[in-house]
Image: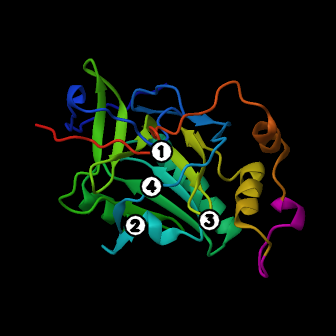
Amino acid sequence: MLVCRSNVSLTVKMGLVSVACALSCLYGVALAAETPSGSEFRFFKEHPAANDFAMVTSDGSPLRLSDLKGSVVILNFWRRNCQYCVMEKRHLDEMAQRLSRPDLKVICANLWDSPTAVKAYGRKNGGKLVIAARPDGSRSVVENTVKGKLMGYYVLSEAGEAIYEVKGFPSSYVIDKDGRVIAGHVGMAQWAAPSVQNWISGLMGTKRPGDNLAPDQYKLPLWIDRLLSAAPTETPRSGITNGRRAQIGPTN
């Protein structure tokens, strides 16, 4: 595994607050790493609501995750100088081009690097992808540091809540049309693979005129169907304690 060293200096004093990050126990620790491709998505038995946060697009337009309800959303977290992030965007763009559906939104959010640099990158390399940055002057992420060791990052809401955990780059979440998180993936996913495209197509629903896919491609792939129907040995935790998201407290 190649480790992408962080140049982000944000820290949070964990002793004063109880932090429960939405979707926090979906993956094993990746040490904020840049990770190669993996074939497995991790699915939630219960689908937690996708928490909202603010972004800006390449042209500076405001964008909120809640604006996309009614579409299937691929929420992809990435940062600069990550070779697997660049490679994965090609797969994501190929999938978006192939499916060519208005109810599929691929949001590639870089909340770590300079918004100016992220927006400039998006204007040159966006394609079918929506390249999103953090709003200027905002604090959108915080390091998860345990005993001086960087374990990953929390994405913060405007209220300072830890709402997503990013343990490696790239990391992605799949959100359905009702705004529920269905699955996640750490590392470069093979979005252009037929089985993955079939699954995403199934989430979008009935085939529409002009689609290039055969009707049977809207069926759930067997490997996903078996995974979802299997009795899990341990129920994935959503990171929501007693139905409430924990608040990130003030930092010094």
Three-letter code for the amino acid on which mark 4 is drawn? Asn
Residue pointed to by mark 1: 243
In the figure, 162 relative to 217: above or below?
A: above
**Under tag 2, what secondary structure?**
strand
Please provide the residue range marked out in magenta.
208-218
Three-letter code for the amino acid on which mark 3 is drawn? Lys
**Picture coordinates of residue 108, whole percent (x, y):** 46, 57
Q: Main secondary structure of the magenta part?
A: loop
Q: Say whether residue 215 is visible.
A: yes
Front-lying residue, 74 or 124: 74
**Picture coordinates of residue 77, whole percent (x, y):** 44, 49
Residue pointed to by mark 4: 51
In this view, the residue farthest toward the right is 216
Which residue shows up at 27% across the image and 17% down it?
A: 147
- Mark 2, Cα crowd under 10 Å, few <14 / some 14-19 / many 20+, is few
Three-letter code for the amino acid on which mark 1 is drawn? Gly
How far apart marks 2 and 1 lie (CA) works out to: 23 Å
How far apart marks 4 and 3 lie (CA) works out to: 14 Å
- Mark 3, Cα crowd under 10 Å, few <14 / some 14-19 / many 20+, is some
Which residue shows up at 63% across the image and 60% down it?
A: 94
Whether residue 24 is in magenta: the answer is: no
The nearer-to-camera label among 3 and 1 is: 1
Q: Are marks 4 and 3 in contact (CB under 8 Å)?
A: no
Q: Which one is earlier in the sequence, the residue at label 3 or at label 2? A: 2
Q: Which one is earlier in the sequence, the residue at label 3 or at label 1? A: 3
Three-letter code for the amino acid on which mark 2 is drawn? Arg
Residue pointed to by mark 3: 177
Residue 132, by quadrant, is bottom left
**Under tag 3, what secondary structure?**
loop
Q: Are marks 4 and 1 in contact (CB under 8 Å)?
A: no
The nearer-to-camera label among 4 and 1 is: 1
How far apart marks 3 and 1 lie (CA) works out to: 22 Å
